[in-house]
């Protein structure tokens, strides 16, 4: 049986247009979470931080379309264990609809970074 509380796979939430760093599922979800927060609030820039990432996500405030995939565009400047990089991506319309259909407390969340 399907569990409705299960998080959707990251590839339904974001589509990467360009990346100088390989994206793991957790990195993709971290970028998605920050971009979605920026999108909902209408903010321009947000910080991301975690065990293996730090950087900034910029809301480019424009929609882009690549074939049949469309949505608001973002750019992230990140530092990971593999070095610095840039990721350009969009939040998919399908992903936005999935997120908006859920109550805020059930939306996917990335675990906060460990504090030393």
Image (cartoon, rainbow, N blue to C red):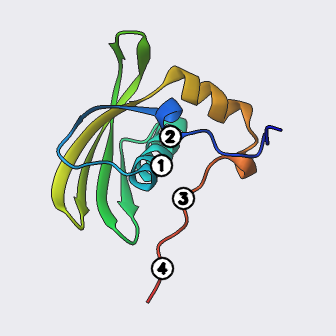
Q: Earlier in the sequence, mark 1 or mark 3?
A: 1
Residue that mark 1 sits on: 29
- For label 2, the residue is 10
The quarter of the image holding the C terminus is bottom left
- Look at the picture and state if 29 lies above or below 100: below
Check disc 4 and report the residue beneath it: 114
Q: CA distance from mark 4 to mark 2?
A: 22 Å
Residue at point 64%, 35% (across, down): 99
Considering the numbered disc 4 on the image, is that residue within a helix, a strand or a loop? loop
Q: Which mark is residue 110?
A: 3
Label pair 4/1, CB-CB below 8 angstroms: no
- What percent of the width, then of the height, locates residue 20? 17, 45
Q: Secondary structure at mark 3?
A: loop
Judge the density around disc 4: few (<14), some (14-19), many (≥20) Cα neighbours within 10 Å. Answer: few
- Within 10 Å of disc 2 (Cα), the crowding (few <14, some 14-19, many 20+) is some
Is 23 or 14 nearer to us in this picture?
23
Distance Cα–Cα, label 1 vs label 3? 7 Å
Q: Left or right: 106 with respect to 56? A: right
The residue positioned 39% from the left and 53% from the top of the image is: 27
Q: CA distance from mark 3 to mark 4?
A: 12 Å
Question: Of circles 4 and 2, which is in front?
Answer: 2
Outermost residue toward the top in this view = 67
* Position above or below: 81 against 64: below
x and y, in percent, of residue 92 in the image = 48, 25
């Amino acid at each position: 049986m399907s569990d409705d509380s299960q998080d959707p796979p990251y590839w339904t939430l974001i589509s990467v247009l360009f990346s100088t760093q390989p994206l793991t599922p957790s990195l993709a979800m971290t970028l998605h979470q920050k971009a979605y927060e920026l999108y909902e609030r209408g903010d321009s820039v947000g910080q991301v931080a975690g065990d293996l990432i730090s950087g900034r996500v910029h809301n480019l405030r424009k929609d882009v379309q690549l074939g049949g995939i469309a949505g608001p565009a973002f750019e992230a400047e990140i530092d990971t264990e593999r070095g610095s990089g840039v990721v350009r991506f969009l939040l998919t319309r399908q992903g936005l609809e999935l997120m908006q259909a859920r109550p805020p407390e059930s939306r996917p969340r990335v675990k906060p970074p460990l504090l030393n």
